[in-house]
């Protein structure tokens, strides 16, 4: 929900890498309009899901974005792209991330996807070990061009 955006931005900003790409609003301040536009674009497109993990007491503690990409490869099979996976730093290692990724894989199967893929910065060695424990294989080299 749009109301969760301040917490989601804060989760994204807990990134282990020293990249100042997120702007966390101060208490009571509005979220940067760019985040609102991004949320609205995701919300309007059925190929995208912005997933929010919430504890039983209502605390937002995790997020990830899923994008279904149709393709010609894999006999016309779609793939599910998993991006921006974050779990609150005080709850990492508690099983929330594994539950989220299991849910994402189940979602991919339900959508008829043939592949689940993700990228992870090469410096995130703990994340890589996590994904490998879940059965993901580091098969490709990724490239990005920041604009």
Image: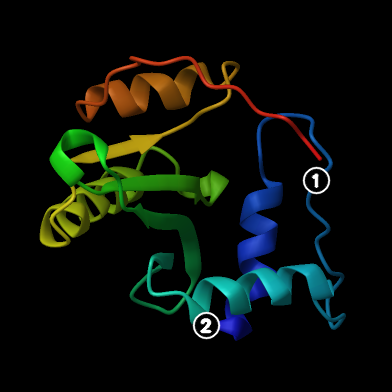
Q: How many marks?
A: 2
Q: Position of residue 122 (x, y in %)?
A: 57, 16
Q: Position of residue 11 (x, y in %)?
A: 62, 55
Q: Position of residue 121 (x, y in %)?
A: 58, 24
1 or 2: tag closer to the N-terminus: 2
Q: Is residue 49 above or below residue 105?
A: below
Left or right: where does residue 146 sit relative to residue 97?
right
Left or right: where does residue 107 sit relative to residue 80?
left
What residue is rendered at 18% in x and 35% in y? 74
Left or right: where does residue 45 sit relative to residue 39?
left
Q: Is residue 133 above or below residue 26?
A: above
| SS label for mark 1 | loop
Q: Which residue is mark 1?
A: 21
Left or right: where does residue 30 sit relative to residue 17?
right
How far apart marks 1 and 2 lie (CA) works out to 22 Å
What residue is rendered at 71% in x and 49% in y? 13
What residue is rendered at 38% in x and 66% in y? 47
What residue is rendered at 53% in x and 71% in y? 42
Q: Position of residue 37 (x, y in %)?
A: 71, 75
| Image quadrant occupied by the C terminus | top right
Q: Quadrant of residue 38?
A: bottom right
Instruction: Give 85 or 119, whichever is nearer the viewer.
Output: 119
What colouring method underlies this structural image? rainbow
Q: Is residue 51 visible?
A: no
| SS label for mark 2 | loop
Instruction: Give 27 or 31, whichever is nearer the viewer.
Output: 31
Q: Disc 1, disc 2: CB below 8 Å?
A: no
Q: Which residue is mark 2?
A: 1
Q: Quadrant of residue 144?
A: top right
């Amino acid at each position: 929900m749009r109301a969760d955006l301040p917490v989601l931005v804060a989760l994204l900003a807990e990134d282990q890498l020293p990249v100042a790409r997120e702007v966390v609003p101060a208490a009571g301040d509005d979220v940067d309009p760019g985040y609102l536009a991004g949320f609205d674009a995701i919300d309007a497109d059925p190929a995208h899901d912005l997933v929010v993990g919430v504890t039983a007491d209502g605390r937002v503690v995790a997020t990830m974005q899923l994008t279904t990409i149709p393709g010609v490869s894999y006999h016309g099979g779609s793939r599910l792209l998993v991006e921006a996976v974050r779990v609150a730093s005080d709850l990492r290692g508690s099983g929330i991330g594994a539950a989220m990724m299991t849910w994402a894989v189940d979602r991919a199967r339900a959508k008829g996807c043939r592949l689940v893929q993700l990228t992870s910065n090469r410096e995130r060695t703990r994340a890589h070990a996590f994904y490998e424990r879940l059965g993901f294989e580091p098969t490709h080299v990724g490239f990005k061009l920041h604009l």
